[in-house]
């Protein structure tokens, strides 16, 4: 039976706005922070059916039906759970990925269980290590906090975990794949984490998906983290979200690292999550939107943190998430700041957090004030760019007034500059999309991104050289291509392979052009459908031609 991964399910949910989906079935009207309409599951004259966009849930106070976007489709369309996911994936343009391997899902569950066991192994290590306990005490962390986040300790040993793995009978290759142990050039396994505090990474489903390790002495790098794996995808997860879910709050503080989350929790601020050391992703923003109404960005104030803040602002604006920015002076991160100044000082900073537009406006003002005389005119253009990016007419008008007053520029002149900027941007986007469509074509390849494997070359040969034979045997060849991935057409080796199959007849040129002109992912099944569709179109054209001739003959 085909299975769908949790990551793919998360991607589908994140891309399926419940208001947009239900709005295709129900005439929804905004009512406060929610939407209302007539229930599609029972007859009523007064709307009792509500949709909460923030929580991505629906509920009818009349008949009691409720749930999320998937359960709505299940009930409305009469589909099963997997069928509903596929239905939503098609709407969102997401390619479904199934595994026909019966052991695929059990394997992931096995890895979750192994990770949970390893988490307990590190946790017990911590409880018996005076060095690790003293390190955490010196950082002000209590035993209660250690238990909440299930912190652990990796001993300063090359074989401590390896010996435990041997004792438990776990497959070392599996643990190498998920980044817990490494293999030397001589083929011997050794512990990846040594002399480090261990932070288990637990997803919002409660599964242990990875680990982070912080050096307690002078080891470098300061942090080590689990690599991407079948069970760990950074972009779909937030550190600490499993803790936050239990609080059922309405706001989240977004920070950079594990210690920031833990330090804030230590002071009773238990609604912080971290983006796992990476810049915020669209998937993480949608995850935040699902669980909170407001988010406060509190990244470090170094150049990397400022850049990450600016990127997060853009993502939250695109995702329609209300965001504010907490700025901590002296270049302190949340961990250091709250230890130095205390909880009340941090909450005061939160209270004075700027919304995204005031933050960006102040940022440009600061850049302008620091610019030299010749550079100031260039910085004025940043204000125009800033104004052009504000969707709300009312908000834009407020900032137009501010800029107009500050620089003694006529408001009509500013608005003209903004309109001109938007016109230029639209023209550039149109050109960009045109050339992207022209040049960014893709073609099928195996997981190895450098070349086609034997089966793929054979299928391409049949498609281009013996199309009829291929169509007759397509089911056989499909089975050998279930793991195909994608690659850019500009790849040298791919183009060399394709050159072998260039044909000059109309049929093959059509297929080749489809590969090269299509900006969407292309898999063998799509080529098959295109070939079959092309054959049908040809036959229809032939029938039309014969019909025309027949009519002509009868009219003579």
Image: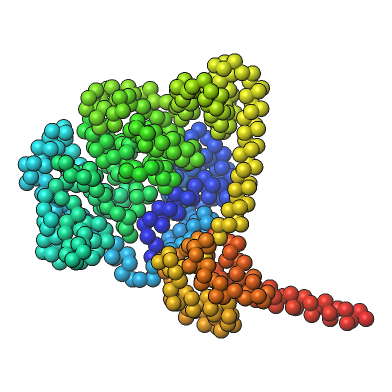
What count of labels does the image hold?
0
Is residue 531 at all visible to an observer of this figure? no
Front residue of this view, candidates 167 and 513: 513
Residue 174 point in image, percent of width and height? 24, 64
Front residue of this view, candidates 320 and 290: 320
Of the 4 image quadrants, the one containing the N terminus is bottom left
Q: Is residue 179 above or below residue 23?
A: below
Q: Is residue 326 left or right of 25 when viewed as pictured?
A: left
Q: Is residue 197 left or right of 349 when viewed as pictured?
A: left
Residue 391 point in image, percent of width and height? 57, 33
| Image quadrant assignment for residue 291 | top left
Residue 165 point in image, percent of width and height? 15, 62
Residue at screen point 50% across, 67% down: 494
| Image quadrant assignment for residue 296 | top left
Q: Is residue 540 above or below residue 12?
A: below
Check the image and name the residue furthest to the right.
556
| Image quadrant assignment for residue 498 | bottom right
Snapshot colouring: rainbow
Is residue 338 at all visible to an observer of this figure? yes
Front residue of this view, candidates 306 and 538: 306
Q: Is residue 531 above or below residue 363?
A: below
Front residue of this view, candidates 23 and 17: 17
Residue at screen point 52% across, 65% down: 443
Q: Is residue 271 left or right of 144 when viewed as pictured?
A: right
Q: Is residue 404 left or right of 549 when viewed as pictured?
A: left
Residue 73 point in image, percent of width and height? 49, 55
Of the 4 image quadrants, the one containing the C terminus is bottom right
Residue at screen point 53% across, 40% down: 36
Residue at screen point 64% across, 18% down: 410
């Amino acid at each position: 039976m085909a299975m769908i991964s949790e990551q793919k399910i998360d991607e589908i949910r994140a891309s399926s706005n419940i208001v947009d989906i239900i709005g295709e079935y129900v005439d929804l009207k905004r009512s406060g922070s929610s939407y209302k309409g007539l229930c599609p599951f029972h007859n009523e004259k007064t709307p009792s059916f509500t949709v909460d966009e923030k929580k991505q849930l629906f509920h009818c106070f009349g008949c009691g039906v409720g749930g999320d976007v998937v359960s709505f489709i299940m009930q409305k369309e009469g589909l099963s759970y997997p069928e509903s996911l596929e239905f939503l994936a098609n709407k969102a343009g997401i390619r479904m990925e199934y595994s026909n391997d019966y052991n695929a899902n059990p394997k992931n569950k096995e890895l979750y269980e192994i990770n949970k066991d390893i988490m307990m192994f590190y946790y017990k290590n911590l409880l018996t290590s005076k060095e690790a306990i003293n390190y955490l005490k010196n950082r002000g962390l209590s035993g209660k906090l250690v238990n909440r986040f299930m912190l652990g300790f990796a001993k300063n040993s090359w074989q401590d975990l390896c010996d435990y793995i041997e004792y438990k009978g776990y497959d070392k290759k599996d643990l190498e794949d998920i980044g817990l142990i490494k293999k030397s050039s001589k083929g011997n396994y050794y512990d990846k984490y040594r002399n480090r505090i261990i932070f288990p990474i637990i997803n919002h489903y409660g599964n242990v998906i990875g680990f982070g390790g912080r050096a307690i002495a002078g080891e470098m790098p300061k942090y080590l983290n689990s690599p991407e794996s079948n069970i760990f995808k950074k972009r779909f997860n937030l550190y600490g979200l499993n803790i936050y879910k239990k609080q059922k709050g309405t706001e989240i503080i977004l920070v950079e690292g594990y210690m920031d989350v833990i330090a804030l929790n230590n002071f009773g601020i238990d609604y912080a999550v971290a983006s796992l050391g990476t810049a915020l992703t669209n998937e993480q923003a949608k995850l935040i939107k699902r669980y909170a109404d407001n988010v406060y960005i509190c990244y470090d104030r170094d150049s990397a943190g400022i850049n990450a803040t600016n990127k997060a602002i853009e993502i939250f604006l695109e995702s329609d998430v209300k965001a504010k920015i907490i700025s901590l002076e002296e270049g302190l991160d949340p961990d250091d700041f709250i230890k130095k100044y205390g909880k009340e000082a941090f909450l005061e900073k939160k209270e004075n957090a700027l919304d995204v537009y005031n933050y960006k406006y102040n940022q440009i003002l600061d850049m302008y004030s620091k610019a030299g005389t010749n550079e100031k005119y260039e910085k004025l253009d940043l204000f125009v760019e800033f104004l052009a990016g504000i969707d709300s007419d009312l908000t834009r008008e407020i900032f137009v007034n501010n800029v107009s007053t500050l620089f003694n520029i006529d408001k009509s002149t500013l608005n003209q500059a903004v309109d001109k900027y938007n016109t230029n941007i639209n023209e550039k986007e149109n050109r960009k999309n045109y050339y992207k469509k022209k040049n960014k074509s893709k073609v099928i390849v195996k997981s190895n991104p450098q070349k086609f494997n034997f089966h793929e070359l054979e299928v391409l040969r049949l498609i281009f050289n013996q199309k009829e034979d291929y169509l007759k045997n397509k089911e056989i060849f499909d089975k050998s291509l279930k793991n195909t991935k994608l690659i850019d057409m500009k790849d040298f080796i791919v183009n060399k392979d394709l050159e072998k199959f260039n044909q000059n007849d109309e049929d093959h040129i059509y297929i080749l052009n489809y590969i090269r002109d299509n900006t969407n992912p292309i898999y063998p099944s799509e080529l098959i459908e295109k070939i079959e569709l092309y054959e049908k179109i040809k036959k229809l054209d032939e029938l039309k031609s014969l019909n025309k001739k027949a009519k002509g003959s009868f009219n003579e």
